[in-house]
Image (tube, coloured by chain):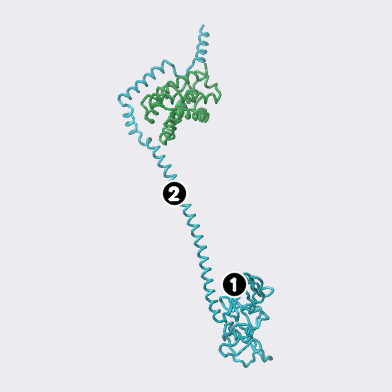
Chain colours: A cyan, B green
Amino acid sequence: MAKEHKQAVIAQKAIFTTGSMRLSRVIPSILFAILILAADVSLNLGERIKIYVGLASEPIIFIPQILNEGWTSFSDYFEDREILQSEILELKKDVDAQRFNLLNYEKILQENIELKKLLGYLEQTTKKNYIYGEIEEINFAPKPSMTVGIGKNKKPDQMIAFNWTGLIGSVELSAGSKVEIKPIFAKDSQIPIRNRRTNSNMILVGTDVPQNFLIKGLKKNEDIVPGDKLVTSGLGKKYPKGIEVGTVNKISAISNNEFLEIEVLGTSEFNSGDQILLTLP
Amino acid sequence: MAYFSTRNPNKTLSTQLAIGISLISGVFFQSLLNFFSFEIYGSSIPVTLMTLIYWNIALPKNIGLVWSFISGILLDLNLGYFLGTHVILFLFISYLTQRYFHRIRAMFQIQQSILIASIVFLYLVILYIFFQGFSFFVFLAIALNSIISAVIWPILFGLLRLIRRKYTYA
């Protein structure tokens, strides 16, 4: 009998168990909750409890607010950082643009200086006809030459070339809008010059080395000293008169030779600048 | 008999702690949702209710009237309802879930989710009808919240099951 009773209890518990809640306990609890609700509605009990609970647990209540403020400042930090980064990027772009402008400005300034010098050289020529061009290519091998771009329908034949440092050569070939300049220091180049100090005429011969010339055929009794300025004499009418081409650098006398060997340092730099003035002598 | 009577006394405290902490966390989370206005037309996801339902299904012997009472009161205080509103609802829902916990446990996950959606829907409808006001948009918001709750239920279920396995005797 006792065994049967035990089994019945187990079966009852297994089938009808409702955990720890029984209706007999739930109903009074719900009634109690309704009582609390009624008390709160009529006496505003909840408000008072909230005030006391709020005072007691003030730090806990502030947690959401602190979290909110923390999150706001955290996101603001990254937002400000992003704004600053974009501003820095924009400023960097501005700096690059300004650098580019500065380079352009320096280039224009240099061009102005060159053109001013070239205008000065133009004053020394007949000014009958002249062309401005820009250097496109410079070669030193197999023979020194320079290609200059000029406008179309120009006739640069027999013209001489100046850059901002001085006389650099003469037109050798012209085709379309391009001109090939033969430098004055070319080996087969001969320039009639005179010594500015003594006015004695002589011939300057190129050596194929930039700014390096020789004067040959001067006797040992010739009045010439290192430092003498040499200018074009205008003889032969290939080059205009009075343009400085070099300075006497070194004079050597060979014992069994009656002539002097004179080295001249050229004034103009062949590959300097961008602007070229082509003019008739 | 052993199933109904055997309890590890060392684990009773940790079980109660796990239930309590998870319920209070649910209240806190729901208050946060309310505070940050993550709500749809004034109603947010009832995380506390879902947590309570889980414990009622999982450990019906351990969760009694007290936890329903405490969590209900805390939620009323935090969300600004009349005291006792959530207590009545929680007691009623706890009773029903404990009454039928065998059947709910045996359900598939999707069936559980549908049941949770239904409970949440009824809970929110009662809250609105008696304590706020009802309109078509409120109905839509409640329906949407019910669907979201159903979607969240498997995640919450998995999370709480992890806690149960680690910190309770069951």
Give the residue at mark 2: A80
Q: Of label 2 and label 1, which has the lower sequence position?
A: 2
Q: CA distance from mark 2 to mark 1?
A: 54 Å
- In the image, is A50 to the left or to the right of A272? left
Chain identifier of the residue bearing label 2 in the image:
A
Chain identifier of the residue bearing label 1 in the image:
A
Please tell me the numbered disc located at residue A133.
Answer: 1
- In the image, is A140 to the left or to the right of B48? right
**Residue B33 image position (x, y, % from top left):** 43, 34
Residue B22 appears anywhere in the view: no
Q: Quadrant of residue A250?
A: bottom right
Q: Quadrant of residue B109?
A: top right
Up/down of A33 relative to A243, above or below: above
Residue B169 appears anywhere in the view: yes
- In the image, is B135 to the left or to the right of A268? left
Question: Residue visible at 66% across and 72% down?
Answer: A175
Up/down of B79 relative to A97, above or below: above
**Residue A275 image position (x, y, % from top left):** 57, 72
Type of amino acid at the residue the image marks with label 2: Asp
Badge 2 local density, few (<14 within 10 Å), some, or many (20+)?
Answer: few
Disc 2 versus disc 1: nearer the observer: 1
Up/down of B137 relative to A201, above or below: above
Q: Quadrant of residue A33?
A: top left
**Residue B144 image position (x, y, % from top left):** 48, 29
Type of amino acid at the residue the image marks with label 1: Gly
Towards the viewer: A6 or B157: B157
Q: Residue furthest bottom?
A: A221
Q: Residue furthest top?
A: A1
